[in-house]
Each structure stands twice: as C-alpha cells, then as structure tokens.
Amino acid sequence: MRDLTRRTFLGSGCALLLAACSSRTARSAPRDALEPTPNIPDEDDLPPVPAQACAADPTARNIEGPFYKKGAPHRSVLVDPNDDGQRIRITGTLQSTKCVPIGGAMIDVWQANAAGDYDLEGFRFRGALTTDAKGRYDLRTIIPGRYLNGDRYRPAHIHIKVKAKGFAVLTTQLYFAGDPYNDGDPFIDASLVMQHTAERDIRRARFDFVLPA
Ligand SMILES: [Fe+2]
C-alpha cells in the first residue's frame, strides 16, 4: 500500500493541479475486493430515452483533476456491500446533439470513497460502463466524500470521461444538489448538478450526457 502524501503529491507534478487535488492521504484497497458485475440490469429497470434530450446543449466539460487512471474494470456497480457511504443509483442516456443515441460508448467513472480518498493503487470506486444500444447507462455507487482543496472542501463530485467512437472525449464531473460546498466552488458548473431523491434506502439521480455531433 502506498500513501500519497502532500509532499510526494506536489513532487509528482500535481502542483499545477493543486486546486483539484486532495490534501488528504489517499488510501487503497485490495484490487480483488470488488467482483465484476453485470453492466446493464433488467430492461424494465432502465429509464426511457428522453424525447427532448436532443434539444439539449452538449454536456459541459469540467476539469479532469489528477487522479484519473486508465484501465478501470468493466462494471456498473462500484460499491461493495461493506463500504461506507450513502448509496446512490445514477441512470441516464448518452446522445448526440443530433438526437442519436450513442450505444457501445465507454463511460469511465472515478470518485473518492466516503472518506474523501481516491484509490491510487487499485480500482476501488472506479469503473468503466458501456452504454447499451439505446445509449443508456446505469451506475450504482455512493455519494463521494468531500476532500480539502486548499483550505476549503470541494463539493461531492464524480469524475467522468465519455469515450464514443467518432466523438471527442468528454471529461467532466457530476455534482449533487444540496451540497453546502457547491456555492463558491471554483470548478462547479450549474448544468452538472444532479437533483437526487430518496428511493427506499438509496438515492436516485438522473443525468443525460450529450455529445456535440
Ligand atoms: Fe475529484
């Protein structure tokens, strides 16, 4: 297990990205702690493709930050039963601005755990989803913990890269309505803030990604 201390973090070239980095120690966990899971659940469990999504503007870009890792396992369930954190299910679609659902695209997800730490050794809370033929995805995870950015916390956020054939890679972040640190965050974009509601013991949110055709 390797700790990412502030010293090594700055020394590794992250200094220019300090605003997006955590000043906390990043923890890791055994890579085999999570079992691969089916990518898409039952057909009836997925949201309908929105009729108006094609009128939307392209999804706003947002900073990548320093903690992206290639090679995340193909899975849509990032949370283990023993993990801390508020469970949330995020569903939605991927479409182009010409109203075309984009199937077979990769949605690469990475986020902090409930304590605000990124796994830098393994792939905890990291996963790559593939959209189905209708452009749909279904992510099961937790609302990430916050981490310090200088002397203030960044709001909870999930990092995303959308990789679809014929389109430029979209790098962005998703945020959560009601987070007290949303106001004043230097990176947040209002269009990336998700409303979320209670559904039994988990939260539910929806976000539709739109790529410029
Ligand atoms: Fe982050």
Image: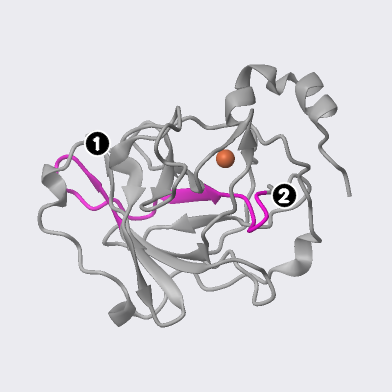
Label 2 sits on residue: 119
**Residue 19: quadrant of the picture:** top right
Between marks 1 and 2 in the image, the one whose residue lies nearer the viewer: 2
Q: Which residue does the image show at 62% across and 57% down from the upper left?
A: 125
Q: Which residue does the image show at 43% across and 37% down from the upper left?
A: 172
Dividing the image into four quarters, tell me where ligand 1 lies.
top right
Question: In the displayed structure, does residue 71 sit left or right of residue 88?
Answer: right
Q: Amino acid at mark 1?
A: Pro
- Residue 137 appearing in the image: no
40 or 11: nearer the viewer = 11
Q: Which residues are magenta?
A: 93-116
Question: In the displayed structure, does residue 35 sit left or right of residue 3?
Answer: left
- The x and y percentages for residue 116 are 65, 49
First along the sequence among labels 1 and 2: 1
Tell whether circle 1 marks a residue whose Cβ is less than 8 angstroms from ligand 1.
Answer: no
The majority secondary structure of the magenta stretch comes to loop
- Residue 102 magenta-drawn? yes
Q: Which residue does the image show at 87% across and 44% down from the upper left?
A: 2
Colouring rule applied to residues: one colour
Vertical order, 3 against 123 (above or below): above
Q: Amino acid at mark 2?
A: Asp
- The x and y percentages for residue 28 are 79, 53
Vertical order, 66 against 182 (above or below): above
- The x and y percentages for residue 195 are 31, 57
